[in-house]
Image: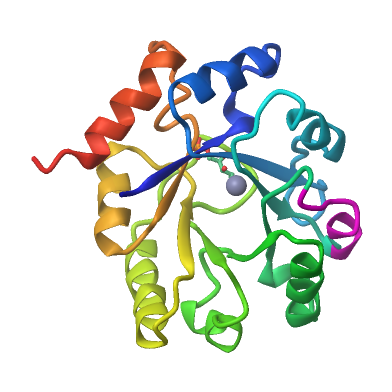
C-alpha cells in the first residue's frame, strides 16, 4: 500500500501546528521537511529549529530532505529524536558513503536524493547501504512545478536494481505528484509519494478531506 508524505513547505506556514494536527488526524504517513540553503537550490526552506519543535506535537515519522551544498553540516545537528528519515543529494557531496554511515550512526534511516538529470545507475554502488531513495520528479527547490514524465522510467529502473538485489529499499517520488502521475509512479515502483500543492495542499479543498480523497484516488483501480 503506497504511503503519503506531506510536504510541509506547501502547508499553511502561518498555521503549521494546526496543519500538523489535521494531517495526523487524516492519517498522513510521513511529514516531509524540505531544508534548503539558497545555494544548492535558489530557495530557502524550513529550518532545523522547526524540525526539532515538530516532535513536540507529533510522533508521525519525520522525513527530512536536505537540498543543501554541505549536507554534513546538517546531518551533525539532527538525530533520531527529531528525524526518522534523512536524505541528502548525491549531487551535493563527494563522500556519500561517509555521510550514509554518519546518518545511520545517528540512528536515522539513510536516503539518497537524486535530481532528475542524475541517472538511476548512480545509485547502484550504494543501493545496499541505504534505506530509501528520493527520486525527484521535478527540478528541486520549488513547489508547483511541472512533473517530468521521464522520471517514471527511472523509478522502474531503480526498482529493478532493488528487486535484483533482494533489498527492501523504499522509493520516494518527490515533486508535482497528482492523482494521475501519482498512480503512474506507484505502478512503476514508488512506495511513498511526497504530496504538496499538486495533491493535498489545494486552495479549494479542506486539508482534512484532501489527504483521504487523494489516498482513495491513488488506491482506486479505475
Ligand atoms: C521540491 C520539494 C517538494 C515539493 C512538492 O523541491 O522537494 O517536496 O515541495 O510540492 P509540489 O507537489 O507542489 O511539487
Ligand atoms: Zn522534498
Return the residue nearer the eye: 82 or 8: 82
Residue 87 at x, y = what percent?
67, 59
Is 91 within the magenta?
no
* Vertical placement of residue 78 versus 43, above or below: below
Return the residue nearer the eye: 83 or 75: 83
Query: Which residue is drawn at the image coordinates 74% and 81% (left, top)?
Result: 97
* Vertical placement of residue 5 versus 129, above or below: above
Query: Which residue is drawn at the image coordinates 39% and 31% (left, top)?
Result: 199
Query: Is residue 161 shown left or right of residue 182?
Result: right
Residue 182 at x, y = what percent?
32, 46
Query: Is residue 119 shown left or right of residue 62?
Result: left
Query: Which residue is drawn at the image coordinates 28% and 63% (left, top)?
Result: 188
Query: Which residue is drawn at the image coordinates 36% and 77% (left, top)?
Result: 157
Return the residue nearer the eye: 123 or 30: 30
Q: Which quadrant is the C terminus positioned in?
A: top left
* Vertical placement of residue 96 versus 25, above or below: below
Give the total number of marks visible in the rendering: 0
Residue 187 at x, y = what percent?
24, 58
The colour scheme used to paint the residues is rainbow
Question: Which segment did they paint magenta?
Answer: 72-80
Query: Is residue 126 shown left or right of residue 219?
Result: right
Q: Quadrant of residue 17?
A: top right
Q: Quadrant of residue 168?
A: bottom left
Amino acid at each position: 500500500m503506497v504511503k503519503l508524505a506531506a510536504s510541509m513547505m506547501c502547508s499553511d506556514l502561518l498555521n503549521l501546528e494546526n496543519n500538523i494536527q489535521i494531517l495526523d488526524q487524516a492519517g498522513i504517513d510521513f511529514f516531509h521537511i524540505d531544508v534548503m540553503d539558497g545555494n544548492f537550490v535558489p530557495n530557502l526552506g524550513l529550518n532545523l529549529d522547526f524540525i526539532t519543535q515538530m516532535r513536540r506535537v507529533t510522533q508521525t515519522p519525520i522525513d527530512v530532505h536536505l537540498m543543501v551544498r554541505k549536507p554534513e553540516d546538517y546531518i551533525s545537528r539532527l538525530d533520531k529524536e527529531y528525524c526518522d528519515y534523512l536524505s541528502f543529494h548525491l549531487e551535493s557531496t563527494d563522500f556519500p558513503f561517509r555521510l550514509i554511515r554518519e546518518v545511520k550512526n545517528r540512528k536515522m534511516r539513510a536516503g539518497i536524493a537524486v535530481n532528475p538529470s542524475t541517472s538511476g545507475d548512480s545509485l547502484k554502488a550504494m543501493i545496499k547501504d541505504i534505506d530509501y531513495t528520493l527520486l525527484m520528479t521535478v527540478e528541486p527547490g520549488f513547489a508547483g512545478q511541472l512533473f517530468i514524465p521521464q522520471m517514471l522510467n527511472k523509478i522502474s529502473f531503480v526498482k529493478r536494481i532493488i528487486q535484483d538485489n533482494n533489498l527492501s529499499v523504499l522509493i520516494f517520488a518527490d515533486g508535482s505528484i497528482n492523482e494521475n502521475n501519482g498512480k503512474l509512479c506507484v505502478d512503476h515502483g514508488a512506495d511513498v509519494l511526497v504530496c504538496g500543492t499538486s495533491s493535498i495542499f489545494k486552495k479549494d479543498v479542506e486539508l482534512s478531506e484532501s489527504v483521504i480523497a487523494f489516498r482513495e484516488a491513488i488506491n482506486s483501480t479505475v
